[in-house]
């Protein structure tokens, strides 16, 4: 099997860094089980699982891929991996002769997910 490389896109990286900072500040204050810390732990666990099995998430039908992802990243496939507290990691797979690349596009809550995918309440 080809090696798997996980790459965070700009938005996903910003969300991850912000969450990491908040969780770190909470830990320094003696807070050990916050929502932020649980979410960060869930994301890290998801990343570990996705590095082992790129198709561990749920593949989205091509017709449901938002135009913003197609235009912004030039993707032709989209996957999601459910996290704690109704958050999702949204990613795409690319492959070449050497490796499989998992491009993490977004780390988003349910409200943002619904907005991006055009779902209504």
Image: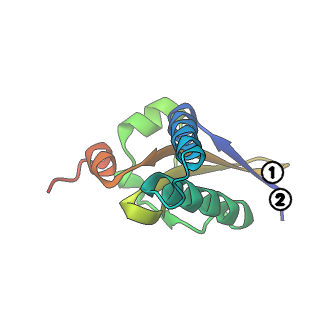
Circle 2 packing at 10 Å, graded few (<14), some (14-19), many (20+), is few
Disc 1 designates what residue?
A: 99
Q: Position of residue 98 (x, y in %)?
A: 85, 49
Question: In the image, which disc is placed on residue 73?
Answer: none
Q: Position of residue 53 (x, y in %)?
A: 69, 67
The quadrant of the image that shows the N terminus is bottom right
Q: Is residue 85 above or below residue 26?
A: below
* Residue at image coords 54%, 66%: 57
* Residue at image coords 67%, 42%: 7
Q: Nearer the viewer, residue 30 or 12?
A: 30
Residue 78 in view, yes or no: no
Q: Is residue 20 above or below residue 85?
A: above
* Residue at image coords 32%, 54%: 110
Q: Nearer the viewer, residue 117 or 39?
A: 39
Disc 2 designates what residue?
A: 2
Classify mark 2: helix, strand or loop: loop
Q: Is residue 52 above or below residue 79?
A: below
Mark 1 and mark 2: Cα distance apart in space: 5 Å
Q: Position of residue 9 (x, y in %)?
A: 58, 36
Instruction: Tell which circle, 1 or 2, labels the residue nearer the N-terminal end.
Output: 2
* Residue at image coords 30%, 48%: 117
- Residues at badges 1 and 2 in contact (C-beta under 8 Å)? yes
């Amino acid at each position: 099997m080809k090696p798997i490389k996980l790459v965070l896109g700009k938005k996903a990286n910003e969300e991850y860094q912000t969450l990491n900072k908040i969780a770190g500040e909470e830990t320094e204050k003696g807070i050990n089980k916050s929502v932020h810390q649980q979410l960060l732990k869930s994301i890290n666990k998801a990343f570990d699982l996705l590095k082992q099995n790129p198709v561990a998430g749920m593949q989205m039908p091509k017709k449901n891929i938002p135009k913003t992802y197609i235009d912004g990243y030039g993707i032709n496939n989209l996957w999601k991996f459910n996290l704690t507290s109704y958050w999702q990691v949204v990613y795409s797979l690319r492959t070449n002769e050497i490796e499989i690349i998992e491009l993490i596009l977004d780390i988003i809550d349910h409200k943002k997910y619904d907005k991006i995918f055009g779902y209504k309440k």
